[in-house]
Image (cartoon, helix red, strand yellow):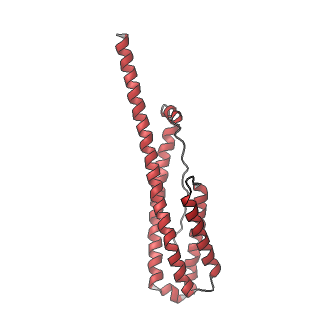
Amino acid sequence: MYTLFSLIITSCLIIWFIIIYNRFITLKNQVEAAWSDISVQLKRRHDLIPKLVDVVRQYASYEQAILSRVTSLRAEGQRMESLKDRDLDKTGQLEKNLSEHLGQIKILAESYPDLKASQHFIELQKELSVIEETLQHARRFYNGAVRLLNTRIDSFPDLAIARFFNFSYRQYFQLDITHE
């Protein structure tokens, strides 16, 4: 009788262990997939910037400082995105600075009526707005997945398995893109 009881308890513990471990794997994969979505949107945004800079340069050649800064921030963003171990705080700050400078380009367009009326500029601005909106949705999904993973890592009894298999906390991605 004791052996049967031990076998049942051991079986239950093994099943529990497998279920909890699989939940961690699912959450880890959700976080990675969500970051992949953010990465795609950042790449789309970075790929759009040279087109926007070229259009603005055609109309506002005297505004070289803003255009150079946007180009520099874009290059830095691409470099950070290529790193395996990314610092989400730095990435968020860099993308926020890039957003601010892109906002300056929008303000700059007000001073150049031909630029403001350019169909190509208008289309690029619309595409940029769509990308930024999609990026915000991807960020929210990513942060939600991170919250679920981090909560499970902190929850008893799951934290025992999390520590045993070295599941670690993930950083939230802070990015505030202002739409003007």
Q: In which quarter of the image is residue 102?
A: bottom right
Q: In this view, does 79 lie above or below 15?
A: below
Q: Can residue 95 be seen in this view?
A: no
Residue appearing at x 44%, y 69% in the figure: 130
Quarter of the image containing the N terminus? top left
* Residue 92 pos. (x, y %): 57, 60
Q: In this view, does 2 lie above or below 43?
A: above
Q: How many labels does the image show?
A: 0
Residue 27 makes an appearance in the image: yes
Q: Which of 143 and 53 is in front in this view?
A: 53
Q: Residue at x 44, y 52 (%)?
A: 33
In this view, the residue farthest toward the bottom is: 114
Q: In this view, does 124 lie to the left or right of 106?
A: left
Tell which residue pokes out farthest to the top in this image: 1
Q: Residue furthest right?
A: 65
Left or right relative to 124: residue 169: right
Q: In the figure, is residue 84 to the left or right of 31?
A: right
Residue at image x 40%, y 30%?
Answer: 16
Q: In terms of image quadrants, where is residue 22?
A: top left
Q: Is residue 17 above or below residue 119?
A: above
Q: Position of residue 73 (x, y in %)?
A: 60, 69
Q: Where is residue 18 in the image (x, y as percent from the top left)?
A: 40, 32
Is 138 situated above or below 55? above
The image quarter containing residue 59 is bottom right
- Residue drawn at x 60%, y 61% is 93
Place of residue 115 in the rendered image (x, y in percent of width and height, measured from the top left): 52, 86
* Nearer to us in this view, 85 or 132: 85
